[in-house]
Amino acid sequence: MKIIHGYEVKKALINNFGVRKLKTIVLITGTELTRIFLHNQLQECLGEFAIIKSYAVDEGISKDDICGDFLVFSSKITYDKTNTDIIDIPYIIAKRTFNFANVDKLLYLKQGTEVLFVNDVKETTYSVIEDLNNLEINHIKFIPYYPGIDKYKCYEVAVTPGEVDMVPKGAKTIIDIGGRPIEISSLIEIIQGIGYYDERGNDISSSYVKKITGMRNVLSITNGEVITSNRDLERIVLSLNRFQIKNYKNLFQVAKNFLLIDNMNLNIKEDLYKKRYYAKYTFDHIVGKSKEITEAKNIAKKLAGTNLSVLIEGLSGTGKELFASAIHNYSPRSDEPFLAVNFSALPEELIESELFGYESGAFTGARKGGKIGLFEQASGGTIFLDKIGDASFALQMRLLRVLQEKEIMRVGGDRIIPIDVRVVAATNKNLTKLVDEGKFREDLYYRLKVGYLVIPPLRNRKEDIADIINEFFIRKDSKMKVSSEVVEIFNNAQWRGNVRELINTLEYAYEFCDGDCIKEEHLPIDFKYVEKCSYKSPKKDIDYELKTILEEIYKYQNENLIIGRRLLSEVLIDRGLNFSEQTIRTKLNSLQHLDFITKSKGKSGTKITSKGIEWLKQNG
């Protein structure tokens, strides 16, 4: 027998006809709104084999109302408000959780955003905020609000657990995370208390998880290894782990192919975070308002709404993985896994088995039972293939089959496995050039390039530098600033490492600055040296981009080769300039206006003039 709060809980009685009597669960809440919400939850989960009665303290409760086999309080506050002298039946104070599909809405708010958190009672307001922070929803700052508060400041965004009518005027955006359902550990205590857990526990687990997550993927955790996951599942498992549900080893042995967890253990949180099978970034994380970055974001958003494979080109540090992550989160696959693999980070002998998995005995040292590959783990979601230009020719052939046939075969296996995975690839290399050199398969190149995105380098959108600096200090929660001399240095820099280099420079200066303003003396030594020795005023020189184009034209002309706009667009990528043919046409017109080039139709193409050659010699 189980003892709960000092009361003996007996098995349900069987009547003389062999039919089990339905036991009565009495729910007591603080408000009528909460009563209705939790009553519906208990009715849905337990109504088939228990009678559910419910009362709200605000509406008044008498001793005659509390008549049943098991008593459930919605909170400690509700328990304290109830005359405990009248309680003579087993009871629990239920733990409450969140509907994680609704809580997801909070993840799209920017770091450091201050929001008004609106609830009906002061105590529960602070309690819910604490629970949200415990779930690591701590990138935003919750400002408590409840009826009767002395004073408060109006904020643009208000968050509430179902108390929309209480939100004060002035809030432009209201995020309703919905009522807070009873946590599954408490549900298990309830059904154990009325003697049903052994028979119905698994069905309750299934019903509960379906109710609060909306997950579609199957998760298998065997010997501590996470096979596949998504953000919703991560949060529900972390929540369970946090509330010490470790005693219920078979809690989630759910039928109907919904959720399979063989052994829950205390390392689940570490495993999930190490795997990071979810996309961390959205388009809100891409900072800047320049024409170039805005155009790239607009193209990426359109691509996100399709199911096309996408090839992202851009120099190192421009944010290719950030864009890939944002595309996934903006797509219909956003609730599914997002897996990233870097071809330059894994040795050739491992990359194939990591991507496609392997069968038992496939090679020396292969794990008994085999291993599932990343393509299978990403089922229904997106796989991000970073540094695709570093893939071997043999691996390129296998990737081509995935894109063409939507199926894979594990290493050492003989079974075709169909997959539903969107492929987003990225490179900082000129794939067209690699194709011409026979180092990259042309058919794979065009399979990947169905959707195409070029990320502009930072030197082409320097008006975004101020926004990036501002965002950096917001994330640091710092009021520090940069001096005008540093701003000038940043605006003159060429940023070969792009946004990553800018962020790294700011990180360095932030740590070395003892005051509230970053000055030139706080910058890295090599950065200051380059600035003093190399940078020239733009007024004393022609545009860097025009000079680069002129150099390429001259190089091809010396080799007796003709270069047109299309080829010029491709070779400029290696120089860090990603232009459309229309943009190149405009810049060629500028060079022609300076008498540095001549343009002809047909095979003659574009040629550099003697004036252009002389200028390059003087300014090279």
Image (cartoon, rainbow, N blue to C red):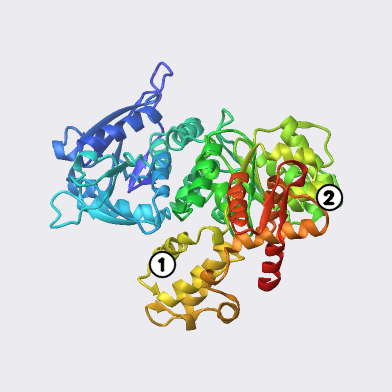
Q: Nearer the viewer, mark 2 or mark 1?
A: 2
Residue 504 is drawn in which quadrant? bottom right
The residue carrying mark 1 is 473
* Element class at badge 2: loop
Q: Indicate the quadrant containing the C terminus: top left, top right, bottom left or bottom right.
A: bottom right
Calculate the distance from the C-alpha at mark 2 to the C-alpha at mark 1. 45 Å
Q: Indicate the quadrant containing the N terminus: top left, top right, bottom left or bottom right.
A: top left
Which percent across, then down, holds residue 465?
47, 63
* Element class at badge 1: helix
Which percent across, then down, holds residue 219?
59, 40
Look at the picture and state if 76 lies above or below 251. below
Residue extending furthest toward the top: 17
Q: How many numbered discs?
A: 2
Q: Earlier in the sequence, mark 2 or mark 1?
A: 2
Residue 189 vs residue 133, the one in the foreground: 133
Question: In the image, 83: left or right of 618?
Answer: left
Residue 250 vs residue 598, the one in the foreground: 598
Please give the name of the residue rendered at 20% of the width and 49% of the height, measured from the top-left corner. 121
Q: Amino acid at mark 1?
A: Phe
- Residue 280, visible in the rendered structure: yes
